[in-house]
Image (cartoon, helix red, strand yellow):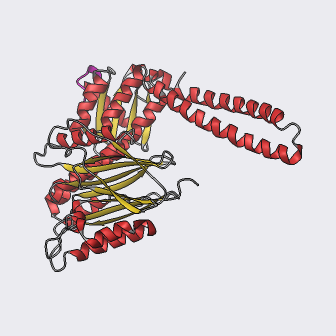
């Protein structure tokens, strides 16, 4: 039984069991309590029953999906999907095709540009080497809209997955044709996940190509900066228990700083603050790679794996002198915790309100730089989150500013006052105060680096 059928069966079974349990418990528990008491008990049992049902079904569904994706041909296609998540160039995609589709799935593949129908890659197999195959595919598929589907023995579109000769994906100007009899054995949801990852991959390829084209042909760094800003979040998540605000000021058009705030579910948020070594086009590329790697992570709560994926992605780009420093913080509003990795960033801050007054805790570096030297270990630390706690993240462009007398901003009375008063202000006001201090603290001197700030203020956790 495939995942969709198993999921529907689980949903139906859970509704039947929940309804039966609700009726039985309500009947026995409400006896002898009168009309008002009966109504109150029934309502309480209703909410309890169906909240438990939803939690159980959510776990059940996740287990069914994991089981479906880990069996037979489905697992092999899922392995290819995982490779696509970490690909940034066409050669990397071709290597994934050779390793995971041709060798493991015993498939033949053709990758084609849709505007010219010129092959980008063709498997060295008898089927795909046939010069007449390309003409047949062009005739049968050229007029299709973007999406994915299955092919029959005549290389035409078919809706019968169980009798398909292979599958195709058409997105972002590329056709990917995969010929394999094993496709009929793959769970349908594995194709859906692959299509989504290919959409993201081709977007990455087009963005990187655009950056190189702009830099090489027009030298319009303003356009590069505008493209780079599309990597940053256009809007921060909104949640009643976590108020977020950010500030981004590049020293020149193209920055090496980056930040993000990703909502994982109703209770968890991934806070990101990073800085790429150097400036210019290479820094912009590394920044985009780091953010895309973080956003493409299948399990964004696995901070260690995200750090290692970023490390590997940067190393694969082949820059000898490029690396990032990075802070990842997983705020769990249900468990009241902040789990974090500080990979060579300056100290970040958590301001805690106590009965004796505000306490400023420094979230110190616990892991080495990412992307340059071997990454031996990744340490994850955990601290408690409370109502009105404030997480303040920033790059060294703010924290290492010096005034005209050489005194660092990090230890200045003005900075300490902003931190100790943090609980009494909104996240937006805190960002405004820190940004204003950063831009005025140097006096008549010029700023030397980008300034990026991300503030998260915890709301009432016990509501």
Q: Quadrant of the C terminus?
A: bottom right
The N terminus, quarter of image: top right
The answer to whether residue 142 shows anywhere in this view is no
Q: Is residue 25 above or below residue 397?
A: above
- Read off the magenta span: 121-127
Q: Which residue is drawn at 22% across and 38% down?
A: 312
Whether 209 is among the magenta residues is no
Asked whether 229 or 135 is in front, the reply is 229
Q: Is residue 343 visible?
A: yes
Q: In this view, does 134 lie to the left or right of 157?
A: left
The picture places residue 188, in percent across and down from the top left corner, at: 48, 29
Q: In this view, does 202 lie above or below 94?
A: below
Percent coordinates x, y for residue 181 in the rendering: 40, 20
Give the residue displayed 35% in from the left and 43% down from the top: 296
Tell how many labels: 0
Q: Which of the two residues, 172 or 303, is positioned nearer the viewer here?
A: 303
Q: Which residue lies furthest to the left in this view?
A: 320
The residue located at (70%, 32%) in the rendering is 18
Closest to the observer: 252 or 89?
252
Q: In which quarter of the image is residue 436?
A: bottom left
Q: Residue at x 87, y 36 (%)?
A: 31
Residue 322 versus residue 325: which sits nearer the camera?
Answer: 325
Query: Farthest residue toward the bottom?
Result: 444
Please determine whether, in this image, residue 53 is positioned above or below residue 427. above
From the viewer's perspective, is residue 458 above or below residue 430? Answer: above
Residue 321, position as x, y percentages in the image: 11, 48
Tell me, yes or no, whether the highlighted magenta stretch contains residue 124.
Answer: yes
């Amino acid at each position: 039984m495939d995942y969709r059928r198993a999921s529907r069966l689980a949903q139906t079974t859970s509704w039947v069991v929940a309804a039966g349990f609700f009726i039985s418990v309500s009947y026995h528990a409400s006896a002898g309590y009168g009309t008002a008491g009966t109504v109150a008990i029934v309502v309480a049992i209703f909410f309890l029953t169906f909240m438990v049902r939803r939690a159980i079904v959510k776990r059940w569904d996740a287990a069914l999906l994991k089981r479906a994706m880990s069996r037979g041909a489905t697992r092999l296609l899922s392995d290819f999907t995982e490779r696509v998540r970490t690909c940034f160039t066409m050669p990397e995609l071709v290597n994934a095709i050779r390793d995971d589709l041709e060798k493991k799935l015993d498939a033949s593949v053709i990758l084609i540009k849709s505007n010219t129908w010129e092959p980008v890659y063709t498997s060295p197999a008898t089927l795909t080497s046939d010069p007449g195959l390309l003409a047949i595919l062009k005739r049968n598929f050229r007029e299709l809209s973007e999406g994915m589907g299955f092919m029959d023995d005549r290389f035409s579109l078919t809706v019968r997955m169980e009798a398909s000769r292979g599958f195709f994906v058409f997105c972002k100007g590329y056709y990917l044709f995969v010929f394999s009899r094993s496709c009929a054995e793959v769970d349908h949801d594995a194709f859906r996940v692959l299509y989504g990852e290919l959409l993201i991959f081709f977007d990455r390829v087009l963005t990187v190509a655009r950056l190189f084209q702009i830099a090489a042909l027009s030298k319009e760094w303003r356009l590069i900066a505008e493209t780079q800003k599309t990597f940053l979040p256009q809007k921060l998540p909104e949640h009643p228990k976590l108020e977020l605000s950010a500030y981004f000021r590049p020293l020149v058009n193209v920055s090496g700083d980056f930040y993000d705030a990703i909502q994982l579910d109703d209770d968890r948020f991934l806070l990101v603050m990073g800085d790429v070594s150097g400036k210019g086009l290479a820094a912009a590329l590394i920044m985009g790679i780091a953010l895309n790697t973080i956003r493409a992570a299948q399990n964004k709560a696995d901070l260690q794996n995200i750090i290692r994926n970023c490390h590997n992605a940067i190393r694969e780009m082949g820059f000898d002198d490029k690396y990032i420093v990075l802070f990842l913080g997983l705020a769990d509003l249900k468990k009241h915790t902040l789990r974090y990795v500080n990979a060579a960033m300056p100290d970040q801050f958590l301001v805690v309100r106590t009965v004796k007054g505000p306490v400023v805790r420094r979230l110190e570096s616990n892991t080495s730089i990412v992307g340059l030297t071997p990454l031996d270990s990744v340490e994850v630390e955990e601290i408690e989150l409370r109502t009105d706690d404030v997480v303040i993240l920033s790059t060294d462009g703010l924290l290492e500013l010096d005034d005209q007398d050489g005194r660092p901003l990090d230890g200045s009375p003005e900075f300490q006052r902003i931190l100790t008063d943090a609980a009494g202000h909104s996240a937006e006001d805190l960002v405004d105060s820190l940004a204003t201090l950063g831009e005025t603290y140097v006096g008549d001197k010029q700023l030397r680096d980008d300034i990026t700030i991300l503030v998260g203020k915890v709301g009432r956790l016990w509501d």
